[in-house]
Amino acid sequence: MSGSAPIIASTHPNDGLLRADRFPHILCPGCGIGTVIHCYVDAMAASGLALSDHACVSGIGCSGRAAGYVNVDSYHTTHGRALPFALGIAVYKPGMRVTVISGDGDLAAIGGNHLIHAARRNVDLTVICINNFNYGMTGGQAGPTSPRGSVASTAPEGVHDRPFVLPDLVRAAGASMVSRWTVLHVRQLRDAILRGMQKRGFCFIEALSPCPTNFGRANDLGDGMAEMEVYRERCELADGTPGYDALDIDLTDHTRPILVGDFLDIERTPYQPVGEHTA
Amino acid sequence: MTAQAAGQERVLTGTHFMLGDHACAEGALAAGLDFFGGYPITPSTEIAERLARRLPRVGGKFVQMEDELGSAVAIIGASAAGARSFTATSGPGFSLMMESIGLAAMMEIPIVIVDVQRASPSTGLPTMVGQSDALQARWGSHGDYGVAAYSPASPQECFDLTLLAFDVADRYRIPVLLMMDEVVAHMTERVVIPAADAIQRGQRPRPDHAPGATRHLPYAVGDTLVPPMAHAGEGYCVHMTGLTHDERGYPALNEATHNQLVNRLVDKVRLNAGEIERYEEYALEDAETVVVAFGCTSRSAREAVKRGRAAGRKCGLLRLVSLWPFPEARLRGLLERGRVQRFLVPEVNLGQMRREVERLTQLPVLRLNHAGGAMPTPEDILAVIP
């Protein structure tokens, strides 16, 4: 930290869970990724497990930097490949609680095949997909979750493609647990992550997050706080397991709710790859 | 033999009549394979099929991945957690694995990748022989990095070099590539597997302090240039990234750190080439024509040299057991003796390893190439030897 910013406290209760020597972080003012990291380390503390029982794996992008800030065995892999990397750890060391934190573009576009197959297999992972509706780190290009009509640097006239609705996609592929919250819902988000850590199987949590620097600016959503206001005004707790159309997001249509909630939490046999030690 | 037939022994000690692909799988098991992640592709599939049956029965994990992108990364993840892990593929899958060879090199996570080469490019001739991935093995991923690559010429070597590949990967924390070819992979020959306690395993350098005692720096190196490796779950709280990183493993996005890191990744192999490289010599003492060959082609070359010698031609064979590092010092040594008049490099590609020989000599380097689908016969090679 430079210059004039007043130091309110020299330590933070989560310092031991974070790589404090890496601060200041790279994230923009108003970005929600820091909130997700906070929820993750809070869940990790609540899990009651030693730090050595946790591992965090990320892909590429702003969200992909998450692994670099948490003080557990952490791996910042290549674009789209966080899930198979995490599978390798989780299968070889089934006692570990492996969490993937990555973005919508990383997990659903270039890593989309790994996503549906990890869900299909019900690999014992907790996946936190930070969805900020665009590729933030590289300057706001359209991604697989960009809502129709939203403006991006590679969609100057607005996105024409239909987006993935990730909770619906992952549920259909066979996941055990599926939730969607926003970075406004810190307690629900933390609790969902903790349940994912405690559950055996593929647990997917979509965390909607502002990207004021790119998506927010291009689409007149205001600063990070303004997008949080949108979440506060429009989020509704979903009843049951909503499908694609109900979960689809249009940030410009103020009459449509953004459905959040814990959509699925069922018992399914977790992945037991051939070769599980039976002795 | 009953227990062996049931496949419950990790090391199938004894003498076998065995397929090259199966010998590779047995070599991996004997090396202590913990994790296989792969995607079926001809002509490597018998490796996966053998391991699907064998690996679970000895306590390892077999995962059939969704594609080769995932396969290569899954074995890196498992290796990060301490597993001896590998995958097997062929040209099209090898191409998909290139990005992860760079990741493994950059994170310094040991992996072994088998490429059973078929006639390429693209889908090519899926069931027929090729040796045209030789340069891809060295240069295929973007950027500068170090790898080792071995090319077996027999099912026995498929076993032996798979063992070696794991050891070299672990000792130097590099990707090691086993460049088989379809002929050797689908050849059945005698394979002798030693007793389990006769197999020496190379070890990864490991931290010499307990977790938490002092801060572990994942990329702090001494004279060996190879940093000690801590695994996921051991309490060292490592961070690893494909970004340019400092000794803490943290991103350090500046040219000085990058230059130092990439040079070390290359130097790990370059400066240890004498330990990593392998070659075999046959009738080279007074040879005027040196045939340089590898894999299936070296079998024809050996027979051609044998017949050439019987006919009074001064020829010999330098067989490349390691393609990378290329046995450069040995070739220079041959040149210094002054007897060599010419080289001949027969290969099932259009001159990939010939470039390495041409790089080192002003002497004529004769060629005998086929694009794939067929390999040169001893007669073909003998016809080119003066």
Image (tube, coloured by chain):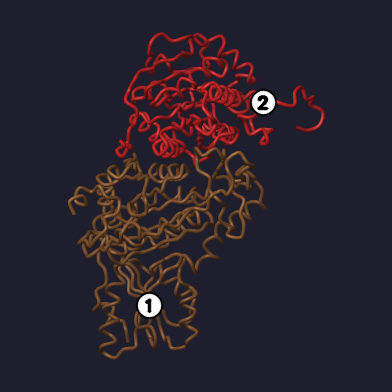
| Residue type at tag 1 | Glu
* Disc 1 element: strand
Tell me the quarter of the image containing the N terminus of chain A. Answer: top right
Q: Colour of chain A?
A: red
One can see residue A77 in this view: yes
| Image quadrant where residue B1 sits | bottom left
Tell me the quarter of the image containing the C terminus of chain A. Answer: top left
At label 2, counting other C-alpha atoms closer than 10 Å, the crowd grade (few under 14, some 14-19, many 20 or more) is: few
| Vertical relation: A74 (above or below) B335 | above
Q: Position of residue B232 (x, y in %)?
A: 50, 39
| Image quadrant where residue A203 sits | top left
| Residue type at tag 2 | Pro
In this view, the mark in front (2 or 1): 1
| Vertical relation: B205 (above or below) B325 | above
Q: Residue at horizontal 22%, vertical 59%?
A: B18
Q: Position of residue A129 (x, y in %)?
A: 49, 27
Q: Is residue A190 left or right of A160 when viewed as pictured?
A: right
Proximity of marks 2 and 1: CB atoms separated by less than 8 Å: no
Q: Position of residue B78 (x, y in %)?
A: 43, 42
Q: Looking at this view, is A50 or B263 the one in front?
A: A50
Residue farthest toward the left in the current orientation of the protein: B2
Q: CA distance from mark 2 to mark 1?
A: 65 Å
Looking at the rendered structure, whether the residues under marks 2 and 1 are on a common chain is answered as no
Q: Is residue A215 left or right of B102 when viewed as pictured?
A: right
Image disc number at residue B281: 1
Image disc number at residue A29: 2
Q: Colour of chain B?
A: brown
Q: Chain of mark 2?
A: A
One can see residue A140 in this view: no
